[in-house]
Image (cartoon, grey):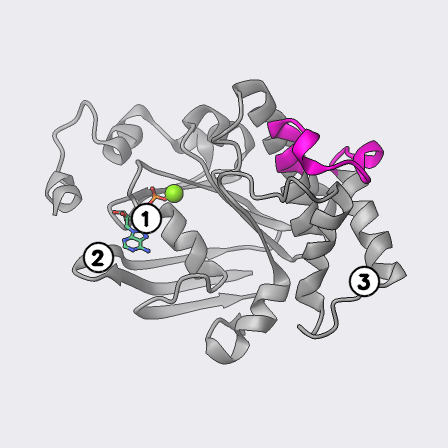
Amino acid sequence: MIEVTDLTKSFGPLAVLKGMTFRVVRGAFVVVLGPSGAGKSTLLRCLNGLVRPNGGSVIVDGIVLDRRHLATVRKRVGFIFQGVNVHGNQTVLQNVLVGRLAEKAPWGVLFSKEDHRIALAAIDRVGLGEKAAVRASSLSGGQRQRVGIARALAHDPAVLLADEPVSSLDPVTGREILELLRAINRERGTTVVCNLHDVGLATRVADRLLGLRAGEIVFDGPPDQLTTENLARLYGECLPDPFAAEVTR
Ligand SMILES: Nc1ncnc2c1ncn2[C@@H]1O[C@H](COP(=O)(O)OP(=O)(O)O)[C@@H](O)[C@H]1O
Ligand SMILES: [Mg+2]
């Protein structure tokens, strides 16, 4: 479903992704772990073309992500952002309908009955059926993130990318949101790649963990293979640290 080959990205002199290669099979729930600054957000943004890599290739659902195919790939990918980016003065439905824009030519922003049907189904799925007509500003943090998920679902993505989707939520609400993503992954077969910094949550929901450190993959495997030694390598605690030079570069 996703094929990343020798992906590199630098911001000026700062090498953020240093030649990353991995595959994600259809229907997987992959969590990307790693310390702040490891390159998790940059990697996720490269997967839907929000960031243009310096080298390497990204293939999503058989389509090479280049300038020519950017719009095609974007249609296949839903993105859920870190802080929740819903528009408070619009209703839940209006916020979710925006997800349908990916399907439309920029000049045709009239939403059809079909758009409404799909948006309302997405709102229902995230448990906000009663709230469709309510202004987003009156929702709790967890409910707002549900709006973000419904918006991503509204264009029926093959892949969902989520960048720290629970970092602004309390632990219980955060877990509920991740369990919702996990349920959507199971019932629709939607491939999910999710950045998290909470190791406990990550091991709970993921099929597979990708551990990033200073722009390189230092762990790749199922949660039950994540040993304390692996964790130390990832976060640089406890063990002598062969990666320290990389981090501070
Ligand atoms: N647009 C940008 N311009 C310059 N530097 C950036 C930009 N985006 C990210 N960086 C830098 O790249 C590094 C990795 O950032 P990021 O991908 O956000 O890491 P993470 O999500 O793992 O915390 C950081 O040092 C960050 O400051
Ligand atoms: Mg980040």
Q: Which amino acid lies under the numbered mark 2 shown in the image of this protein?
A: Ala
Q: Which residue is mark 2?
A: 15
* The quarter of the displayed image where residue 7 is located: bottom left
* The quarter of the displayed image where residue 227 is located: top left
Q: Which residues are magenta?
A: 126-146
The residue sitting at 61% across, 43% down in the picture is 86
Q: How many discs appear? A: 3
Residues at marks 1 and 3 touching, judged by CB atoms closer than 8 Å: no
Q: Which residue is mark 1?
A: 39
Q: Which amino acid lies under the numbered mark 1 shown in the image of this protein?
A: Gly
SS class, disc 3: loop
- Residue 111, disc: 3
Can residue 182 be seen here? The reply is no
State the residue lying farthest toward the bottom.
Answer: 68
**Counting residues from the N terminus, which is met first, the one under dot 1 or under dot 3?**
1
Residues at marks 2 and 3 touching, judged by CB atoms closer than 8 Å: no
Q: CA distance from mark 1 to mark 3?
A: 37 Å
Can residue 232 be seen here? The reply is yes
The residue sitting at 25% across, 28% down in the picture is 232
**Looking at the picture, how far across and down is residue 27, in whole percent?**
62, 50
State the residue lying farthest toward the right.
Answer: 113
SS class, disc 2: strand
Closer to the camera: disc 1 or disc 3? 3
Q: CA distance from mark 1 to mark 2?
A: 9 Å
In this view, the residue in front, 28 or 197, is: 197
> In the picture shown, does residue 66 fall above or below 29?
below
Q: For ligand 1, tell me if the residue under mark 1 lies within 8 Å.
A: yes
**Looking at the picture, how far across and down is residue 246, in whole percent?**
15, 46
Q: Is residue 36 left or right of residue 248?
A: right
